[in-house]
Image (tube, grey):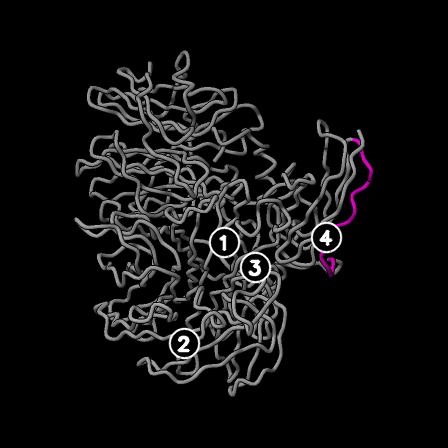
Amino acid sequence: MLQNVEGPRICQTFLHIIAVLLSAMLCATPQSAAAYAERMGMIQSTDHGATWAFKGYANFHAPLLNPVDPTALVDNGLSVVYFFDLLSLDTDTAIVYRSVATDASGLDFTPPTVAFRLAGDLTDPCVVRFAAGKYRMYVHSPVAILSATSNDGFVFTIDQGERTRDGGVPGALVLPGDSVRLFVCGKGITSLKSGNGLDFAPEPGTRIQIPFTGQLVADPHPIKCQDGKYRMAYKVRPKGTTGPELDEVHLAESDDGVDWNPGPASIAIGSVPSMIELPDGRLRIYYVDFTPAFPTSLFRLTNRTPVTPDSVFLTGSFVRVGYVGSRDHLAVTFSGLHKLPGGPIINGRGVKEYTPEMLTTSVTGILTNDDGDSNGRIVGDSYYDAVMAKQQQQPDSVGWRISKFDVTSWTKVKQLFFPVDFPREDVGDMMLASVNSQLDFSAGYTSYGGPAPPDTGAATHHQFFTTDLQFQGKKILNDFPHIVGSSLLFVDNIYCLVSASAYTGNVVVMKYDQNWRFLEAKKLIDRAHWPTGMLYDGKRYYIAYLDTRLFSVPTFFPYCPNVHLAAFDSGWNLVDDIAVTNFSWEDSLFTGRPSVFQWGNRLYVSYDVVPWPEDLSKIEGFVSVYELTPAVSAVPVREDAPTTFQLDQNYPNPFNPLTVVRYQLPVVRWVKLVVYDLLGREVAVLVNERKGPGSYEVEFGAAGLASGAYLCRLSAGTFVQTRKMLLIQ
């Protein structure tokens, strides 16, 4: 979270002064740093880490301190936490505090006492206790791992010399004979070993690899548990994120402390995790929780779960979430490569059931072995699945193979092949909707046959069935240009079909009455497509879609769109719009096929991620979980706040080498202000954070850049504006 191999330190004190300002001041004053209130959260497991529950935030009764970077241990039966005071770092003196839990909750602590003080830039302490009774603290300096020793765990004295320069952010494991295995992060988590805890030699291999959707793993904290297994808490930072606010806490297990098996999913959204095991076998993880200092969004990310890979399901795409009432489970269905036990690898449709907290269950299965585009949906106690296929007896016949399953047992109860008028009626990237007591299977349509040009919208064909798969008729909807990748709802006797006006167009809603007479169309989102997930909770519409606003950046579009989640009121006015993924073309990843499902106060956004160049053998499915929070209108808006979004021309222009960029926001939005060269390469990120209503300015220094034209682009929600700047050296 702080100083480590992720990159250079920024001014930490300034960040946290900003974090404690009142939200009204945030609205009134231009800010140049992200504003987050950092709290120390705690999750707990009673089953050796199989499931976790959030228990609350630690209280250290020290309002003038900002506790970060926790390291915890159980000492004489008491839970002890050491941490840095972030606000002290501007004094060029690092201070580590010690505090002890006062009750069984593990959340109320004694007022902190100073355990270690050292001039310099140190972060990320790790404290271990040796069998011989001594304590050692490993800390991270900008260039090396240092250590300090204590006889009682209260006051530490610096050890001479450096422990290692082979990595950052230490985590330590005391081995028999008081030898030490030190875990450090760099290109993955690696380890070193020492017989005395001071002189370390690197061990070959990597303990934890960086996942393909992550840009780093860090903050290792291993322990040996009473059941004989080793467990390690660590963080993963997803690709496309620039700060720690979306870091994920992960858990790995090992039989020997050397070879580690990462868990299948994140267990919390947080950073710098530290784990302990209580005498009764409970596991606790303390971690840093980044909470916006003022209300910013309708959505709060709580979990991001990879559905694949595992030992059976190797890849995942067309991910959809539904509900199985008989078991109070969520069912996640997906297509991909499946490895049959003792058999071959096949293409097909799989299912995995989870708890509403996205914890795995024992219910899994392979539903079909069809290869091709697919879509599925749970309606009541039935699951319907459609796969593009050819009739076996008639190879020239193209259509859907439609199956119905009983979700209580996941057994197939009916299957049929439904041909369509191909190629006028396409069968790829289909939509499956349950509307007005009917099932609607839909895909793209062109009157002349063949695919529509990507820059133009065409139409869709809709085939209607009963829930027992009896064909009811079809509609060709061509009243307003739109493409495949649609979603459909029937609300207040109105059909609302959401699609994109073209592959490089905008997301629109088309309204039809109950007799399918066209009423009107409305643009919802600029430069976006594939809004394949939509729901309505009686108050708001929620849409999962693909953001394509960066299509002008070379090599980015159409291969690297990002998943977004947007909310609209009942009149289809935008309420909020957030990025679920935030990949750039440099990440070499792109997303697809989003959907959204609601259960209680949670929204489950499902999607897939593919490496670029496109390699479908590595496509993986994900589910990101969001809690609905109070509306963003809770942020006070000044009477003199701007009424429109605006990016002004930089001044001076031409410039050498400094210029000022001004912009304004009428509402709270996540703002990204980026400078590109004319080849679309990112030159500088000037702003990348949530901002309240107001007018702002930021200085851009171009020293070292070549003379010429540059582009400055402001992205704020769905608003995008670009200005050309001229540098003359």
Quick one: quadrant of the C terminus?
Answer: top right
State the CA–CA distance, disc 2 to disc 4: 42 Å
- Residue 265 lies, in percent from the top left, at 34, 48
Check disc 2: other Cα within 10 Å, few if <14, some if 14-19, many if 20+.
some
Tell us which disc is closer to us: 3 or 4: 3
The residue where tag 2 is placed is 434
Where are the magenta residues, as a range? 642-656
Give the vertical position of 224 relative to 646 (above or below).
above
Q: Quadrant of residue 528?
A: bottom right
Check disc 1: other Cα within 10 Å, few if <14, some if 14-19, many if 20+.
many
The answer to whether 702 appears left or right of 431 in the picture is: right
State the CA–CA distance, disc 2 to disc 1: 25 Å
- The local secondary structure at tag 2 comes to strand
For residue 533, the mark is none
Overall secondary structure of the magenta section = loop
Front-lying residue, 639 or 503: 503
State the CA–CA distance, disc 3 to disc 4: 18 Å
State the CA–CA distance, disc 1 to disc 3: 10 Å
For residue 580, the mark is 1
Tell me, yes or no, if residue 59 can be seen here.
no
Which label's residue is closer to the chain start, 2 or 3?
2
- The local secondary structure at tag 1 comes to loop
In magenta segment, residue 652: yes
- The local secondary structure at tag 3 comes to strand
For residue 577, the mark is 3
Q: How many marks?
A: 4
Residue pictured at 27% horizontal, 60% vertical: 369
Tell us which disc is closer to us: 2 or 1: 2
